[in-house]
Amino acid sequence: MKDKREELVEKLLNQGYIKTGKVKKAMLHVPREEFMPPEIRRYAYLDRPLPIGRGQTISAPHMVAIIAEQLDLDEGMKILEIGTGLGYNAAVVSEIIGGSGHVYTVERIPSLAEKARENLEKTGYNHKITVISGDGTLGYPEKAPFDRIYGTASSPKIPEPLKKQLRIGGKLIIPLGSANYFQELVSVQRISDDEFKSEDLGGVAFVPMIGEHGWPED
Ligand code: SAM
């Protein structure tokens, strides 16, 4: 599996998704197969999103690379992720911010949150990543403000609580747009208490962020 991981990282570098040494090192280190159900592990190093149950997916590696690069991460940062899935993206981010940083990640489907906790324990990330079961559109006020916030599910608009919980100078990355797989990845920087500067990073396809400040449940 390690050879296949090296090949995939090389491909993502050549395609320009991985740009920095820190993202390369993290993606070489984190075993994606350990974050997948056994029946699909053999596909772990294809650059594709894959089904993880309950209609959800593990994000494609190139998407994890794009988010990690755009977040412009540094050691010691405090991060909030909305949409844990099975924990892979959070592990890559944790690897970059190191032992002095912490990732808080919120997942709305309790069985996925539980499985993610198991995966993170098995791979040794459980002391640096806290999985919270609940509606991530509310953020996680207990640990705010965050240096970086990112969503791995798409919302019709930026959930207000996330803007409030972003540190001044901090960055938020989230897919915005329709619920049905056509969205723009948007990066927002908090300039002051009530000033935000946003930048469009291009088209993406994510599952919907369902919650009080996202899409309503069917
Ligand atoms: N970060 C994951 C990874 O490493 O592959 C991506 C998981 S998937 C693309 C998005 C996840 O967002 C799903 O597990 C879904 O249940 C979750 N989700 C959707 N709406 C949510 C919400 N309001 N709060 C928390 N999680 C949510």
Image (cartoon, rainbow, N blue to C red):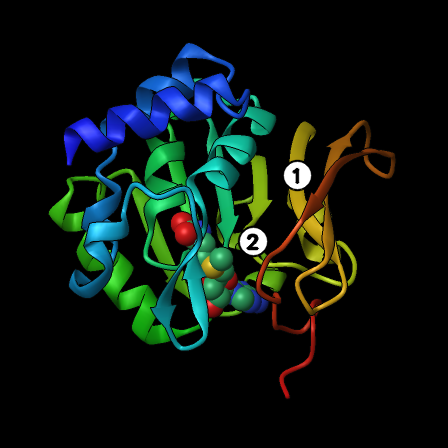
- Residue drawn at point x = 33 percent, y = 68 percent: 112
Query: Which of the pair 56/46 is nearer the observer?
Result: 46
Seen at 86% across and 39% down, the residue is: 194
Which mark is on residue 141? 2
74 left or right of 167 in image:
left
Q: Residues within 10 Å of mark 1 (few under 14, many from 20)?
A: many
Quadrant in the picture for the N terminus: top left
* Residue kind at label 2, given as amino acid type: Pro
Instruction: Please tell me whether mark 2 sits on a helix, a strand or a loop.
Output: helix
Residue 197 vertical position relative to residue 107 in the rendered view, above or below: above
Q: Earlier in the sequence, mark 2 or mark 1?
A: 2
Which residue is drawn at the image coordinates 63% and 55% (left, top)? 205
Amino acid bearing label 1? Leu
Q: Dot 2 surroundings within 10 Å: few (below 14), some, or many (20 or more)? A: few
Instruction: Tell me the quadrant of the picture where the C terminus can be found.
Output: bottom right
Q: Position of residue 23 (x, y in %)?
A: 42, 21
| Residue 6 seen in the figure | yes
Give the residue pinned by disc 1.
Answer: 172
Mark 1, secondary structure of its residue:
strand
Which residue lies most toward the bottom here?
218
Using the rendered view, name the quadrant where residue 207 is placed: bottom right
Res 100 visible:
no
Q: Residue 62 placed where, x, y %?
A: 48, 36
Residue 100 in picture, x, y percent from top left = 33, 24
Relative side of 79 to 160, left or right: left
Q: Residue at x 48, y 31 (%)?
A: 65
Q: Foreground: 117 or 12? A: 12
Residue 40 in percent (x, y) is at: 24, 60
Res 193 label: none
Ligand 1 contact, mark 2 (Cβ < 8 Å): no
